[in-house]
Amino acid sequence: MSESARTQFIPDRNWPDDKEVHINAHGGGILFHNGSYYWFGEHKIEGKAGNLAHVGVHVYSSKDLYNWKDEGIALKVSDDPTSDIAKESVIERPKVIYNPKTKKFVMWFHLELKGKGYDAARAAVAISDKPTGPYEYLRSFRLNAGHWPLNVTEADKVNQEELDKIKSKKFGGSPSSETMQAPILARDFQNGQMSRDMTLFVDEDGKAYHICASEENSTLHISELSEDFLSSSGKYVRIFPRRWNEAPAICKAHGKYWLISSDCTGWAPNAARSAVAESIWGPWKELGNPCEGINPHNKLGPELTYGGQSTYILPVNGKKNACIAIFDIWRPEDAITGGYVWLPISFEDDKIKIKWQDKWDLSVF
């Protein structure tokens, strides 16, 4: 470790890696494996072009969470223009989990096909024998095709006449009265449910879950994964229907499941949301905005989540109920300059609280 090694977190400031280059791992997730943390994220390039995938998924490693070593590109975009992950496709929010049965590292991400906007709304999977890769791309798909959620109602199973009315209709990703009234769940029953902003979660019993914004962003879906973590098992629930949550992040602490998410306002920040449940399947109870304090660098507070958006909740290894909320500060005009806000979570009065701190370290836990 160099003499200039970091010993604390400094939210929304330049975060240099071991090569003194700002970490390039946006919309990321963290894997802890065999004593090391691995940070996977979207590799951005300069300008607006950086909002599309030109390089792939970057990975860094760390022993202490403050200092990160550049481990290169874990998953490269393809030079084949017909590939799902061709250059200029959309590869967002990569997350990696380890499957002890298959001994494979499994990466999931939100995929949009090149030149198709956000219409594909697919989940994609890649695997590797090593945490840093290289990862082999397997496939992309819609989840839970031919399966109704555990909490489906008869009203959700609409007739063909109603489905025909919306067959060729386009919907936006933000709240709208049209989406409110449309039977999106039934529309996608046969071919699989949409998957946009997503995260992964592995429970204490080893079961893994995929949590994503679905139904044109209007409803979150929590899906159990297959034993090999390469597909959905067909068992899933809808939570907060037609509440328009995206950017889900989830953890387990004090025996309960905690969720952070955001409203659907594109790249623009909005107020964070939080929720709690006794079971991963719910029922989930909304708790409101967990954030407190002001980001002094942009003067933004809880009403705009310090200028950021949730991306992951990191459990700190070896510290019980210690979790870090991770937010991205998106800068779509110059994507590579996007920032990171890492803040400690406290669980108080059966609520989740995230207070701004200019500098902090793991001793807070």
Image (cartoon, grey):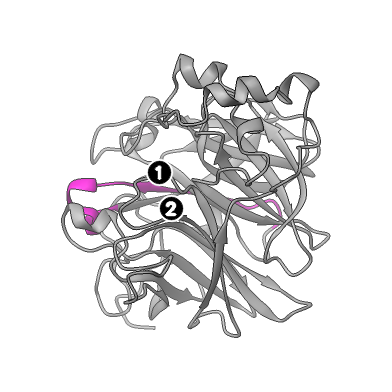
Q: Residue at x 79, y 77 (%)?
A: 101
On the image, the x and y values in percent for residue 250 come to 62, 46
- Categorize mark 2 by other alpha carbons within 10 Å: few (<14), some (14-19), many (20+): some
Foreground pick, 365 / 307: 307
Q: Amino acid at mark 2?
A: Trp
Q: Is residue 291 left or right of residue 188?
A: left
Q: Quadrant of the N terminus?
A: bottom left
User: Magenta part of the protein: which range?
Assistant: 320-338
In this view of the protein, can residue 324 be seen by the observer?
no
**Amino acid type, label 1:** Gln
Q: Which residue is mark 1?
A: 357
Q: Position of residue 288 (x, y in %)?
A: 56, 24
Residue 117: % across, % down:
34, 46
- Work out whether 266 lies above or below 365: above
Mark 2 and mark 1 residues within 8 Å of each other at the beta carbon: yes
State the residue position of label 2: 360
